[in-house]
């Protein structure tokens, strides 16, 4: 390997215009995470903390980047970036409590390690999937741009994380939108045990920036002065001229991926060579050589930090063991919402389902200046269903944003927008495509409030459903994937009136909402709908018909199938349109079933594992003594959704509904 491309070479410190005081301050910032780590490794062996991801040998990156940023600028670290937290002056006892699962930490004992964020210190911690951090940074940076604030956002990834699709998507979005994000890649040689040579073929990680039209730099990650100086220079430039930058920090992971895994897979000579580049000892030697750090001063600095560590450890150890109640745990799944109903006006228009969605969006955009709409083809084109047609001209390109085809990164960006004070509505062109963004929905939007009190003010619009001859990839009604997941709200209207009012409520709500819109209803269902803004409360079903013989519980297109059936065959039935599936109006369901004694739960989704199964179980558990027959579930055939119309009709339950009702009535 040529010398100029060899990262294992002597560290050359250039003090530039640093004062002695600044150089000592950097030393204090650098030595602090090292001393904490050394203590944590002892506590790990004693069983007093559960896990540790060591950043020994990489401290200069975390410290240098953090010190180069202003306090109000967000940083998104990973699990080897202790120096970010210490440089932001987080009280150590809170970190120690976090690592012990105590309530004095940041997650009330609900998550471990650095899996947390804190707005107080402008830090957003990672989830174990690593890559989503990058897209979240884009959302935070976008909010700064929208607020005309000259800030940068720094986000960390290891070399292993750059193999994830999130890396590609995030860099692509940042480049297209020209976002002021520093993508800080710690190239430390290994992704767990897999060497970098088996993860990417380019010589330098920084070379990847070329493909995105992005400026990139290679920085010696073990040289605190180089890290700080170059990042500070770049940050100043990005504040003046917003743009994304890819930074590759050459470094090495001196210990295992986490302590239990060890590092026996690393050649000894490689470890020995990198040990010579230790960022702490080399900088310490430099300061001594320059007569800036005396032995006496060094001892005093270390003694002060060790004393602080011990004092704060005592505080954390003395903290009581974390306890809670089921009620408290459930209360923290969603951010509390003070719902105030807005009544509809008396002036109405007869409009289609699709028009009601469009009106609801437009009125909410008027109502909330901090609301952003994002999605593929939603701007000039108006969306594939023309719901946002004309929005670009009315609200501008900053708020109505076409996105690249990258569901995952856009949902991550929506979460970042929420962190930085914005509402967002993301149109998934078809609900089927949510699979490309499943991870951030389930692990960021759903869990973040429970984990570290960060709400996700995000609505995902989900055009869904069959009966339109669209085949297996554009016809699913996949609500059960999300009703299963605590932390998400799921809305599924069947009528224009409900669609408009419930969409307004979803946007008002500061929790993540998946809003399902059945495509077959878009242009076939008309209704008188109030012209002005109004809301409808979540968790309140609509009783569309009353009868005595059977309760039919359904939602979406199933509502229309059920109404048609009882009208054509003069069946005395309660028809319950659930409208929202999470929260679920169990009171309306139980009240009806106790009256009729028979319950049929109808869903368009395939039967097994659908929400009908849970509703059936709830009815059995709560209304068993009132039942005159078993609860009947009716759903689609257990196959993917076929394209040909006759096969699609065979798949859907609507043509079987009559026989199922008669069978239940005759039981």
Image: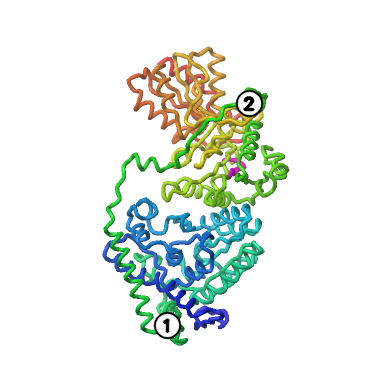
Q: Secondary structure at mark 2?
A: strand
| Magenta extent | 424-431
When the figure is inspected, residue 444 is found, relative to residue 255, above or below; the finding is above
Instruction: Report the Cα–Cα distance between label 2 and label 1.
Output: 74 Å
Q: Nearer the viewer, residue 248 or 19?
A: 19
Q: Is residue 410 left or right of 294 when viewed as pictured? A: right
Residue 530, numbered label: 2
Q: Nearer the viewer, mark 2 or mark 1?
A: 1
- Please tell me how crowded label 1 is: few (under 14), some (14-19), or many (20+) other residues with Cα within 10 Å: some
| Residue 165 in sight | no
Between residue 542 and residue 554, name the one nearer to us.
Answer: 542
Q: Residue 61: percent from the left, percent from the top?
A: 49, 70
Name the quarter where the N terminus is drawn.
bottom right
Residue 235 vs 598, above or below: the answer is below
The percent coordinates of residue 213 (x first, y second) are 67, 64
Q: Is residue 659 visible?
A: yes
Which residue is under mark 1?
293
**Label located before the other in sequence (2 or 1):** 1
**Residue found 36% across the figure and 69% down from its top:** 37
- Residue 341, given in percent of the width and then of the height, sits at 53, 30
Q: Quadrant of residue 527?
A: top right
Residue 441 lies, with reference to residue 289, above or below; the image says above
Q: Is residue 236 above or below residue 521?
A: below
Label 2 with label 1: CB-CB less than 8 Å: no
Percent position of residue 432, x then y: 57, 42
Tell me which corner region of the image, top left, top right, bottom left or bottom right, holds residue 289: bottom left
Q: Residue furthest top?
A: 570
The disc label shown at residue 375, or none = none
Give the secondary structure at mark 1. Answer: loop
């Amino acid at each position: 390997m040529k010398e100029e491309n060899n990262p294992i070479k002597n560290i050359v410190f250039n003090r530039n215009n640093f004062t002695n005081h600044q150089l000592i301050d950097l030393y204090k910032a650098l030595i602090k995470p090292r001393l904490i780590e050394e203590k944590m490794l002892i506590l790990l062996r004693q069983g007093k903390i559960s896990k540790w991801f060591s950043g020994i040998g990489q401290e200069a990156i975390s410290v240098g980047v953090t010190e180069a940023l202003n306090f109000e600028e967000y940083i998104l670290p990973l699990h080897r970036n202790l120096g970010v937290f210490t440089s932001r002056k987080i009280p150590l006892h809170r970190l120690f409590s976090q690592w012990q699962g105590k309530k004095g930490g940041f997650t009330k004992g609900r998550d471990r390690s650095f899996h947390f964020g804190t707005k107080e210190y402008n830090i957003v911690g990672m989830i174990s999937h690593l890559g989503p951090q990058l897209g979240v940074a884009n959302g935070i940076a976008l909010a700064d741009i929208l607020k005309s604030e000259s800030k940068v956002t720094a986000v960390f990834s290891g070399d292993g994380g750059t193999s994830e699709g999130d890396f590609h998507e995030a860099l692509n979005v940042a480049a297209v939108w020209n976002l002021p994000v520093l993508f800080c890649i710690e190239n430390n040689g290994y992704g767990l045990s897999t060497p970098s040579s088996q993860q990417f073929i380019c010589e330098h990680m920084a070379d990847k920036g070329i493909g995105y039209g992005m400026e990139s730099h290679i920085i010696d990650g073990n040289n605190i002065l180089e890290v700080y100086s170059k990042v500070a220079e770049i940050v100043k430039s990005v504040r003046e001229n917003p743009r994304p930058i890819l930074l590759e920090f050459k470094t090495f992971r001196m210990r295992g991926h986490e302590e239990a895994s060890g590092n026996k897979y690393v050649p000894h000579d490689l470890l020995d060579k990198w040990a010579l580049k230790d960022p702490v000892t080399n900088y310490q030697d430099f300061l001594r050589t320059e007569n800036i750090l005396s032995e006496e001063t060094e001892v005093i600095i270390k003694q002060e930090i060790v004393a602080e560590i011990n004092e704060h450890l005592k505080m954390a150890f003395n903290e009581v063991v974390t306890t809670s109640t089921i009620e408290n745990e459930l209360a923290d799944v969603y951010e509390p919402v003070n719902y105030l109903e807005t009544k509809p006006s008396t002036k109405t228009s007869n409009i289609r389902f699709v028009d009601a969605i469009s009106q609801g969006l437009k009125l909410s955009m008027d109502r909330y200046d901090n609301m952003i709409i994002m999605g593929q083809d939603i701007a000039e084109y108006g969306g594939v269903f023309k719901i946002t047609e004309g929005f670009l001209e009315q609200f501008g390109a900053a708020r109505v944003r076409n996105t690249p085809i990258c569901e995952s990164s856009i949902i991550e960006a929506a979460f970042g927008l929420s962190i930085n004070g914005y509402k967002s509505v993301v149109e998934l062109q078809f609900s089927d495509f949510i699979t490309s963004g499943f991870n951030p929905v389930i692990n960021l939007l759903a869990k973040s409030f429970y984990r570290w009190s960060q709400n996700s003010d995000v609505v995902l619009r989900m055009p869904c459903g069959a009966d339109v001859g669209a085949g297996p990839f554009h016809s699913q009604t996949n609500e059960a994937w999300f009703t299963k997941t605590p932390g998400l709200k799921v809305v599924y209207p069947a009528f224009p009136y409900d669609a408009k009012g419930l969409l307004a409520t979803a946007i008002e709500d500061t929790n993540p909402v998946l809003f399902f819109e059945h495509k077959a209803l878009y242009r076939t269902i008309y209704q008188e709908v109030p012209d002005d803004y109004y809301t409808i409360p979540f968790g309140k079903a609509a009783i569309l018909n009353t009868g005595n013989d059977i309760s039919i519980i359904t939602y979406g297109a199933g509502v229309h199938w059920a109404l048609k059936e009882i009208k054509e065959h003069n069946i005395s039935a309660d028809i319950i349109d659930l409208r929202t599936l999470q929260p679920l109006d169990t009171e309306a369901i139980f009240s009806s079933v106790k009256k009729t004694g028979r319950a049929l739960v109808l869903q368009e989704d395939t039967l097994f594992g659908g929400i009908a199964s849970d509703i059936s179980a709830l009815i059995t558990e709560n209304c068993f003594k009132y039942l005159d027959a078993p609860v009947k579930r009716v759903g689609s055939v257990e196959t993917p959704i076929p394209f040909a119309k006759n096969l699609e009709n065979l798949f859907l339950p609507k043509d079987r509904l009559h026989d199922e009702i008669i069978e239940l009535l005759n039981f």
